[in-house]
Amino acid sequence: MGSTITEKILALHAGRDTVKPGELINAGIDVIMCHDVTTTPAIDMMKANGDLHVAYPERVVIMPDHFVPNKDIKSAEMVAKIRRWAKEEKIDKFYDIGRHGVCHALLPEQGHVRPGTTIVCGDSHTCTHGALGAFATGIGSTDLAAALATGELWFKVPESILFRINGALPKGVYAKDVILYIISQIGVDGALYKAMEFTGDVIDFLSVESRMTLCNMAIEAGAKTGIINPDETTLEYVRAHSNEHFDVFHSDPDAEYSQIIDIDVTNLEPMVALPHLPSNGKPVSQAGNIPIDQAWLGSCTNGRIEDLRKAAAVMRGNKVAKGVRMIVVPATTQIWKQASREGLLDIFMEAGATVSAPTCGACLGGHMGILAAGERCISSTNRNFIGRMGSPESEVYLASPATVAASALEGKIANPTTYKQD
């Protein structure tokens, strides 16, 4: 019996020929990503347990992103503490204001994600990086401290579910719609502690950025990671962003999966996840007449240049509806600059939107667009739990950038297929 790509990567990093689902292993970690929220507790734990130091500073990448620009004294002191610690530990890969961004967009952009590697971060959406054929998963601050101090972590080898996605995406339907549909079918625990492996004709067609959107939301189905076997599209992206060595792995034809799910997207509509779960997805035609107060475009799920282009194509020459706030947040400094060069920011602002510096911000109810009681927001983010973007009496609806843009124009949840697409 063959092995999945996930099993092969974990076996290599555990110093084993093979591993099987359910086994407990210690695996070396190639990249440890740190952002502002979960890193300070890890630093405190390291200092409290014998003043531990970072075992491999060259493997650590730091990028404050959740409350940047700093929203208050507490967040400023938090990042100041991380800056001091990074200097003490001689960690050079620190992406501060002016070259910063949302961590899961910035890490691959800066060449720190490569096929065959292991990546951890104290953030659940670390599974994004499986789009490039890496084993990437979110961890808590305790495990983050352990990884920093030792360079390795223990894992239970996950079973894998194979999602074979075929057909042709209709106009106005994108990767975000596909993953919202999948989660609506299997539920928020449908892939609990499993690897969601994506393959099929649709995957072959998708850009790396769209693949990141798929893998990003694997955690919303309870998965340990999302992953895609590398192809030439993957390798072109990696070679354009990194000169580092990497090993490419693919699942064997006779690899064993706990489940195989076939999905035909030919008749898929744009999807909207209604409050208060990502699994509460419905085709936009069935969402009903739902007015909105805010449209939010950004995040580690859909704040990349491809996402901004899709939204701008819908909004070009149109105006945001009266009474609606639209906030656009490019995910990294480079994306912001590129969007400016392409005239996308002008399109948004001429339509009546505002454009922010890169930040996680309102996605987690931090700042830069949080909601008041009774307000509704349609968002390109990944979660719509109660109180996720502000008041527990607000509502968040998840959708693709195109659907977010169309809804901003109409003042209610709207179908983007009636607008120009890229």
Image (tube, rainbow, N blue to C red):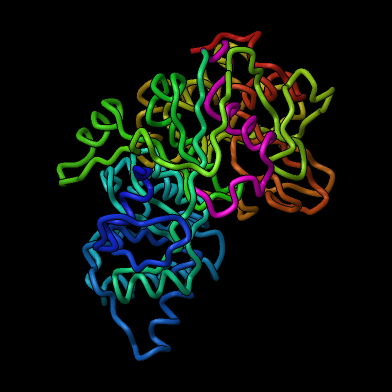
Identify the image quadrant of the N terminus.
top left
Does residue 42 appear to the left or right of 354 in the view shown? left
Q: Is residue 369 left or right of residue 52?
A: right
Pick whichever, 16 or 346, lies toward us. 16
Q: Where is residue 123 drawn, in percent x and y?
A: 49, 57
Percent x, y of residue 293 = 76, 34
Percent of width and height locating residue 213: 49, 35
Q: Is residue 294 visible?
A: no
Magenta stretch: residue 187 in it? yes
- Where residue 336 sits, quadrant-wise, is top left
Name which residue lies at 70% across and 29% down: 272
Q: Is residue 325 above or below residue 140?
A: above
Please tell me which residue lies in front, 227 or 377: 227
Q: Is residue 407 magenta?
A: no
Residue closest to the far front:
1
Q: Residue at x 50, y 64 (%)?
A: 37
- Judge left or right: residue 151 versus residue 156: left
Percent from the top left, x then y, of residue 19? 35, 57
Q: How many marks?
A: 0
Q: Which residues are magenta?
A: 168-195
Residue shown at 25%/67% (left/top)?
A: 91
Question: Is residue 188 at least partly visible in the picture?
Answer: yes
Residue at 31% over, 38% down:
250
Answer above or below: position of 240 versus 383.
Answer: above
